[in-house]
Image (cartoon, rainbow, N blue to C red):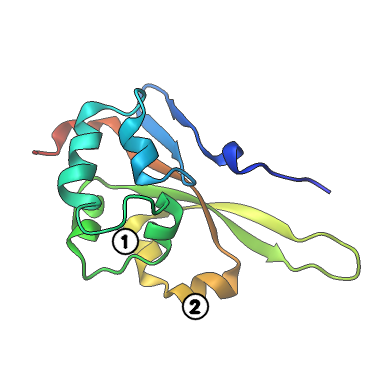
Amino acid sequence: MLVHNEEDFKYIMQDFEKYYIGARYSYDELMSSNFVPFKLKTIIEKYIAKDIDKSATLESHFYFMTDEGFDYRVCRQLRLRLRCSVLASPHVDGVEDKYTEKIYPIDKLVKLSSQDKMDKGLVIRELIIGKLSLLMFQV
């Protein structure tokens, strides 16, 4: 049996095109990290996490996000994508659950209700933010 530590999903990485942020970070933890670009911190503080509890994790915020909020419009403008694990085959007679990985654009993810996400066994693992989208966003 594979056991994951909560810290396994708290990371910030980047390549030439994108930033990858583990979804178990809280907004407080992100804002205090030296690895998060200043512009992204500004966008989070000013637009995305303005009206939510700063101890909320990215995972819980995006899990329950709707297409009616201003935070959604900002994330759509950033072309935010989320790497998710989706239940492929449920636990049956001693065989572990099997998950597949899928990347959802923010607009496709918010179309799913939280009940649909639970039914699919969807777990948000990572935020993917394009550097070009971040560069072009006007603060």
State which tag comes first along the sequence, 1 or 2: 1
Residue 19 point in image, percent of width and height:
38, 32
Residue 57 point in image, percent of width and height:
42, 51
Tell me the kind of residue under disc 2.
Answer: Gln
| Crowd class of label 1 (few under 14; some 14 to 19; many from 20; radius 10 Å) | some
- Secondary element under disc 1, as helix, strand or loop, is helix
- Residue in the image at 17% along x and 50% along y: 47
Vertical order, 71 against 118 (above or below): above
Quarter where residue 132 is shown: top left
From the image, tell me which residue sits under label 1: 107
Work out whether residue 56 or residue 131 is closer to the camera in this orientation and state it. Answer: 56
Vertical order, 17 against 6 (above or below): above
Work out whether residue 3 or residue 118 is closer to the camera in this orientation and state it. Answer: 3
Q: Is residue 18 left or right of residue 8?
A: left
From the image, tell me which residue sits under label 2: 115
Q: Is residue 56 left or right of residue 75?
A: right
As measured in the structure, the alpha-carbon distance from the residue carrying label 1 to the one carrying label 2 is 17 Å
- Residue in the image at 76% along x and 61% along y: 97
Label ID, residue 117 = none
| Crowd class of label 2 (few under 14; some 14 to 19; many from 20; radius 10 Å) | few
Residue 6 point in image, percent of width and height:
60, 44
Tell me the kind of residue under disc 1.
Answer: Asp
Vertical order, 84 against 127 (above or below): below
Q: Nearer the viewer, mark 1 or mark 2?
A: 2
Quarter where residue 16 is shown: top left
